[in-house]
């Protein structure tokens, strides 16, 4: 039987081909003014069932118990609590460092390539200029006053009216559900985000955290650390049954993961086919340079991660790729680092020789906090929107050194709060946009290509987690029993 990663890759290729075929028939029906053929709708239903519903659902089903079991098993397998501290600070330092590099690379790419200044983006800008001309006339007619003051600048009343009108239009559009998420995030300050997205999840009832959908990973990790540390302090004589239970549960969850991976080639083919059939290649017509900027920045960051693995982790690029390719492919198609976590742990421990003591701690933490691809993407996206719409009535912000630095810092911090699920980066992007006063109703411009770019940034997130485990494992190799 062929190796699993070859079958997964074959499934991806077949999925793309099937997706293009379905998209071609859908487009033909639309252009002819006819309804979508019934067999196409039926095919889409089956693709959704076998891919996102069954496979991703199965992976998500085991996330919560796996995180808890792996954290407790990892902590209790360490020689001492001091060893946990040693692994912990090295892991966090690595995560902060690589996320910072990712954002910096993204900003360099978007400032050099300037996708917002390209022809396709300028057509979008010209369309928006025409819309704003109509809005001014509409405001003057309805409110009985000019939209611009004596200096030709928008009045505060006009901007407030425009913000309300554009927000209402976006909330009633085809992407109303996504925009509602953005609007909800916009109402919160940085302090609210820290309190609601970090402090409260940490202190949530562990049973509530385990039962939530998606699971509250921060709460599970925090409780798992407390439970593991308490077991280590009490000792095996008293806490032995608890320790053996979680170590056994961890082994059982990894076995279940192996069973689930047997259907991965077919399931991933279905996920790819559904994605391509829904979007098609037309989405790249006006956003091609933006996509190229994001993917280019991610490619350079991936090369950086391979370099880190070689220099600090002692693992050459070929061995690293062979070790993580299954996890990378799962992350690329599912767009969820949390759903990929079981496969990531299995890959780095079995194929890259990382100690379970390191992997069981660093990888669940990384799936929650270490979002290199997401951080890079958010900085690029906000600057791209400013390049495209900067100087218009409601986008007075310019790309100054201060605004660029603000985007840099906010993107690093916002990526930590991004959930490890599809489209989470769009919500945290609101924090970055709000920091430089970019109206959130401009963010839907990039909705069309977000699913495709999410595949690249999520797989980069998982690669970054894996490299972190390799690096910390090597730095701790003299201490791990």
Image (cartoon, grey):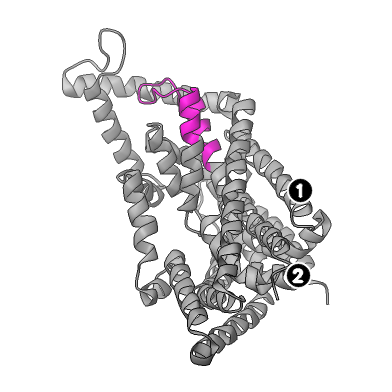
Q: Which mark is residue 307?
A: 1
Q: Nearer the viewer, residue 372 or 237?
A: 237
Q: How many marks?
A: 2
User: Residue at left 53%, top 31%?
Assistant: 384
Q: Residue at x 69, y 69 (%)?
A: 479
Q: Can you say whether 371 is above or below 436 in the image?
A: below
The location of residue 148, given as percent across then percent down, is: 27, 14
- Using the rendered view, name the quadrant where residue 396 is placed: top left
Please indicate whether residue 168 sits to the left or right of residue 409 in the image. left
Identify the secondary structure beneath mark 1.
Answer: helix
Query: Residue 68 at what x, y percent from top left?
Result: 50, 75
Seen at 60% across and 63% down, the residue is 86
Q: Is residue 92 magenta?
A: no
**As drawn, 49 above or below 315:** below
Estimate the x, y position of residue 361 in percent, counting from the top left.
58, 68
In what quadrant of the picture does the C terminus appear?
bottom right
Locate residue 6 relative to residue 71 in the image: left or right.
right
Above or below, 339 relative to 110: below
Please tell me which of labels 1 and 2 falls first in the chain. 1
Does the magenta stretch mainly form a helix, a strand or a loop?
Answer: helix
Is residue 394 rendered magenta in the image? Answer: yes
The residue that disc 2 covers is 353
Mark 2 is surrounded, within 10 Å at the Cα level, by few (under 14), some (14 to 19) or many (20 or more) other residues, namely some
The residue segment tinted magenta is: 378-407
Outermost residue, left direction? 144
64, 357: nearer the viewer: 357
Query: Image quadrant for the N terminus?
Result: bottom right
């Amino acid at each position: 039987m062929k190796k699993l990663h070859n079958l997964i890759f074959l499934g991806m290729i077949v999925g793309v081909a099937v997706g293009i075929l379905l998209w071609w028939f859908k487009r033909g029906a639309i252009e002819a003014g006819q309804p979508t053929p019934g067999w196409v709708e039926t095919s889409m239903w089956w693709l959704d069932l076998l891919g996102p519903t069954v496979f991703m659902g199965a992976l998500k089903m085991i996330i919560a118990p796996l995180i808890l079991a792996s954290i407790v098993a990892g902590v209790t397998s360490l020689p001492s609590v001091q060893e946990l501290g040693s692994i912990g600070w090295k892991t966090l330092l690595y995560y902060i460092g690589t996320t910072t590099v990712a954002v910096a690379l993204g900003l360099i790419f978007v400032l050099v390539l300037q996708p917002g200044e390209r022809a396709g983006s300028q057509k979008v800008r010209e369309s928006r200029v025409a819309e704003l001309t109509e809005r001014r006339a509409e405001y003057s007619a309805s409110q009985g006053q000019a939209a611009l003051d004596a200096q030709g600048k928008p009045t505060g009343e006009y901007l407030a009216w425009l913000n309300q009108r554009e927000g209402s239009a976006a909330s009633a559009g085809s992407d109303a559900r996504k925009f509602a998420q953005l609007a909800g995030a916009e109402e919160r300050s940085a302090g609210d985000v820290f309190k609601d997205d970090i402090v409260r999840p940490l202190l949530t009832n562990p049973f509530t955290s385990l039962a939530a959908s998606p699971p509250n990973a921060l709460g599970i990790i925090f409780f798992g650390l407390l439970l593991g540390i308490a077991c280590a302090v009490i000792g095996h004589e008293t806490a032995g049954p608890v320790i053996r239970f979680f170590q056994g549960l961890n082994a059982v969850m990894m076995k279940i993961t192996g069973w689930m991976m047997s259907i991965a080639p077919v399931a991933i083919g279905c996920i790819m086919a559904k994605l391509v059939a829904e979007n098609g290649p037309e989405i790249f017509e006006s956003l091609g340079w933006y996509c190229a900027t994001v993917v280019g920045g991610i490619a350079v960051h991936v090369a950086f991660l391979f370099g880190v693995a070689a220099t600090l982790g002692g693992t050459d690029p070929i061995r690293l790729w062979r070790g993580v390719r299954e996890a990378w492919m799962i992350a690329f198609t599912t767009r969820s680092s949390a759903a990929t976590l079981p496969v990531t742990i299995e890959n780095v421990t079995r194929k890259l020789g990382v100690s379970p003591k390191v992997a069981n701690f660093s990888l669940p933490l990384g799936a929650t906090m270490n979002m290199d691809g997401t951080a890079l993407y958010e900085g690029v996206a906000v600057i791209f929107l400013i390049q495209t719409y900067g100087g218009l009535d409601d986008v007075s912000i310019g790309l100054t050194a201060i605004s660029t630095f603000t985007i840099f810092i906010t993107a690093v911090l916002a990526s930590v709060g991004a959930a490890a699920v599809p489209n989470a980066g769009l919500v945290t992007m609101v924090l970055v946009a709000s920091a430089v006063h970019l109206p959130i109703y401009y963010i839907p411009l990039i909705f069309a290509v977000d699913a495709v770019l999410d595949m690249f940034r999520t797989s980069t997130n998982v690669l970054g987690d894996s490299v972190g485990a390799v690096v910390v494992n090597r730095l701790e190799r003299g201490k791990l029993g």
